[in-house]
Amino acid sequence: MRFTEKEKKQLLIYVLIAFGTPYLLGLLMWYGSTKGVDLSVFANAQMMYPAAGVMLAYMITKKEDLRIPKRFFVMVVIFTALMAVMSIVSVFAPSENMWILAAQLMIMAGSVLGWILLLTEKKEKREAYGLRFRKWKSSVFCVVLFVFLYLLRTVIAYALEGQLSAIKEITGNPMTWITLAALPVNFFLVFLAFFGEEYGWRYFLQPLLQKRFGLRLGVIVVGVVWGLWHLPINFFYYSLGSGLASAAGQQITCITLGIFMAYAYMKTKNIWVPVILHYLNNNLIPVITANYSADVLQNQQAGWSELLPALIMNGLIFGGFLFTKYFRRSDEMNSRI
């Protein structure tokens, strides 16, 4: 099915903001990487661009819709712009800790304000733009299932490396349990960044691409696009010096994990489920690696030899959900115009 004229305009605005901004700022990331500048603010800011793109697209193409939650949308766009400016300034006025601390405080302030605006918004506005929490039982099931699969993948990975003893060390580390206990509370303080991605990928882009390419292929295309979106981070933040291998690994992660994210969203029609899953996916990394440093995701050495095992494991654990009944329901395709 082809896009309508309104959908084409929305998609163009979305691509310009969600992709144009990080790719343009990628030039600054390259420059900063040659100067040894901490680029953490860029990574934090980039998570906001997809949601900002969606919100600007809706506010421009649906001006007549009184159900648009404008207060929340405008707040997100403003905070995104501030984060982008902060990224730029961090290159030309570098500081070892100041900018990343400022970015984290910005995300916390935006998250708290976001909850206030959402909870005081009219129910019909939240409903109209996918902001209500719904289907509690199915939602909890998807979150629990994801945690189980995530931990299963971790155990298998350690077992294949002959390092099962690391599991005992992790479970015996008090920081493991302190971190796990803090996860639910921390979510409410930093949700905005993860919402920033998922409102763009799952709420906006996934239904559009499924409408165009079909339920299964559409999700695969979203995964590819999601992976390509990470390119500036892959080359200049995650794996400086091994960007190609990092980008290839990113494709595996985004396609396979994107399948499970899509399954969870299609099962629940609750955008908060992918938001929570994305939060857990990122914030469980320090736990399963026993690395609690602030730069746990930065300057990794990605290797080509790791890709095939990652493809097989992630494909088996997450990819199989592509064949569940939710990807056979063509009647669920609804346009968001």
Image (cartoon, rainbow, N blue to C red):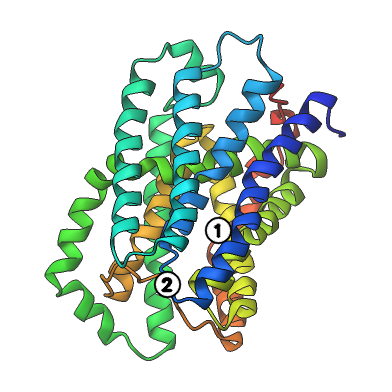
Marks 2 and 1, the one that precedes in the sequence:
1
- Name, please, the residue furthest toward the front: 93
Q: Please, is residue 251 above or below residue 306 in the view? A: above
Instruction: Name the residue at 77% across, 36% down.
Output: 211
Assess disc 2: are there few (<14), some (14-19) or many (≥20) residues with their C-alpha within 10 Å of its C-alpha: some
Q: Position of residue 141 (x, y in %)?
A: 40, 43
Task: Report x, y in % for residue 50.
Answer: 58, 43
Q: Quadrant of residue 17?
A: top right
Classify mark 1: helix, strand or loop.
helix
3D distance between C-alphas at marks 2 and 1: 20 Å
Q: Quadrant of the C terminus?
A: top right
Farthest residue, direction right: 2
Classify residue 274 as left or right of residue 183.
right
The image position of residue 163, as x and y in percent, is 33, 88
Residue under numbered circle 1:
257
Q: Which mark is residue 298?
A: 2
Assess whether mark 1 and mark 2 are in contact (beta carbons under 8 angstroms). Answer: no
Q: Quadrant of residue 119?
A: top left
Judge from the rendering whether residue 118 lies leftward or rightward of residue 230; answer left or right: left
Q: Amino acid at mark 1?
A: Leu
Asked whether residue 266 appears in the rendered view, the answer is no
Q: Does 181 appear above or below 160? A: above
| Residue extending furthest toward the bottom | 162
Specify the amino acid type for callout 2.
Gln
Q: Relative to the observer, which residue lies in front, 78 or 193?
A: 78
Residue 143 in sight from this viewpoint: yes
- Of residues 301 and 287, the one drawn nearer to the viewer in this rendering: 301
Q: Residue at x 35, y 43 (%)?
A: 107
Badge 1: few (under 14), some or many (20 or more) residues near its Cα, within 10 Å? many
Left or right of 180? Residue 221 is right
